[in-house]
Amino acid sequence: MPPQLVELSPGMKVAEKWTIIKKLGAGAFGAVYHCKFGLREGALKTEPVDASMPLLAMEAHVLQELHRIK
């Protein structure tokens, strides 16, 4: 069975501030969306609701560590 992904629509607000612009792509590990907050733009990653091994928390931790050691 394919992974059950959360679908976000253009114009939808995430965390009451980020606006979804469009879906950039999706695969077995989740989906990536282009989003905007004021003049800032970014990418929002989602993972399947039923992920057997959630990876986003670990990825966020690694990115924080990389920014810390700059």
Image (cartoon, rainbow, N blue to C red):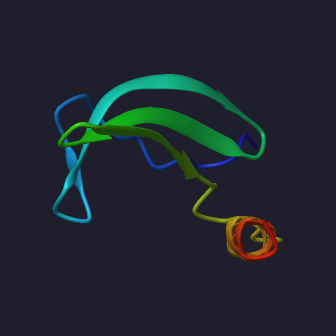
Q: Residue at x 46, y 49 (%)?
A: 6
Q: Tell me which corner region of the image, top left, top right, bottom left or bottom right, holds residue 50.
A: bottom right
Residue 16 lies, in percent from the top left, at 16, 63
Q: Tell me which corner region of the image, top left, top right, bottom left or bottom right, holds residue 25.
A: top right
Q: Residue at x 69, y 47 (%)?
A: 3
Against 69, residue 43 (above or below) is above
The mark tally for this picture is 0
Farthest front residue? 70
Q: Quadrant of the C terminus?
A: bottom right
Q: Nearer the viewer, residue 43 or 39?
A: 39
Q: Residue at x 74, y 65 (%)?
A: 63
Q: Residue at x 69, y 75 (%)?
A: 57
In the displayed structure image, the side of residue 29 where residue 16 appears, left or right: left
Residue 18 lies, in percent from the top left, at 26, 50
Q: Nearer the viewer, residue 46 or 42?
A: 42
Against 61, residue 6 (above or below) is above
In the displayed structure image, the side of residue 22 where residue 47 appears, left or right: right
In the displayed structure image, the side of residue 43 where residue 25 appears, left or right: right
Q: Quadrant of the N terminus?
A: top right
Residue 8 lies, in percent from the top left, at 35, 40
In the displayed structure image, the side of residue 62 where residue 36 appears, left or right: left
Against 17, residue 9 (above or below) is above
